[in-house]
Image (cartoon, rainbow, N blue to C red):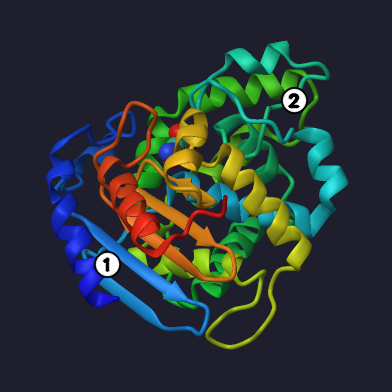
Amino acid sequence: MYKLLETILKNNEIYTKEGNLASYIPELSKANREDLGISVVTLDGKEYSMGVCDKPFTIQSISKVLSLLLAIMDNGRNNVFSKVGMEPTADGFNSIVNLEIKNPIKPFNPMINSGAIVTTSLIYGKDRDEKFERILDFTKKITGNPNIDYNKDVYLSEKETGDRNRALAYFMKSNNIFKENVDEVLDLYFKQCSINVTCRDIAKIGAVLANDGILPWSGERIISREVCRIVKTIMVTCGMYDASGEFAVHIGIPAKSGVGGGIMAAVPNRMGIGVFGPALDEKGNSIAGIHLLKDLSEELDLSIF
Ligand code: DON
């Protein structure tokens, strides 16, 4: 496995030169575009990492998987999907247009920003601190990493510049999609997006989903099989936004990207994969990361289709 990862990493270094660092969250433009890493965690708990796998980056939209899991576990699937759909869109992750045209009005799916703001609003807790503690605790548990914390600079940077998300949230609130205070919901959403993870951490998230909710390293079940099935399905259809179809054809693995440059992938019954490369394509997905996953999928025949 190490030899394979080494070859794949070497062959795809060239792609770190393509695309751009996220700059709409100013703090993210400080990343090093040459960073490239891949981690694989198999279901017997073995971990194989190559390249930049211990350097923290912010989880960003990969956190949408965690908030969806928590929202379903807190509220039940029917309640969650009465407020957010499960259909892919052909628009970008922070698009506004779809919010007004669906009837009844609700975001298309929980992987785009509007949908994730809704799932975040559904997470239980007596106040915003308790809600964030629950998200953080869940992230620690699912990564097996008790040292996980959030990146305050990135959080503040997004809080200062996140007007698109504010627009989405106010529009949804005006349509009674959620009732909570917009500032509080967004504060929680920005914080969850700024949780620091490494390539190893996101590979572990993938491994737990691949293992139907059981932590491969301890045997403890933390999510039901059914909830994992729902979330992996939504990752296939919506996880890479308006590139999900192409990703399914070329790579064929449930996955979720983030503008921090990470992609978390779950190969059912086989492994979790984390890749990291901060330069993004125009859809907000890591260019080099997608190439790494494509090569690994081909080499190990990982497509689920
Ligand atoms: O809300 C935002 O725009 C960011 N915090 C997260 C977006 C993101 O990661 C899109 N993914 N590739």
**Quadrant hosting residue 55:** bottom left
Which x, y percent locates residue 98? Answer: 64, 16
Q: What residue type is labelled 1?
A: Cys
**Image quarter (top left, top right, bottom left or bottom right) of the N terminus:** bottom left
Residue at 54% x, 64% y is 136
From this view, report whether residue 50 is shown above or below residue 304. Answer: below
Which x, y percent locates residue 184? Answer: 62, 40
Q: Is residue 147 left or right of residue 6?
A: right
Residue at 25% x, 67% y is 5
Count of picture labels = 2
Which x, y percent locates residue 261? Answer: 32, 47
Any part of residue 1 in sight = yes
Residue behind mark 1: 53
Q: Nearer the viewer, residue 129 or 212?
A: 212
Front tag of 2 and 1: 1
Which SS class for mark 1?
Answer: loop
Q: In this view, does 178 lie to the left or right of 56?
A: right
Which SS class for mark 2?
Answer: loop
Residue behind mark 2: 106
Which x, y percent locates residue 19? Answer: 22, 32
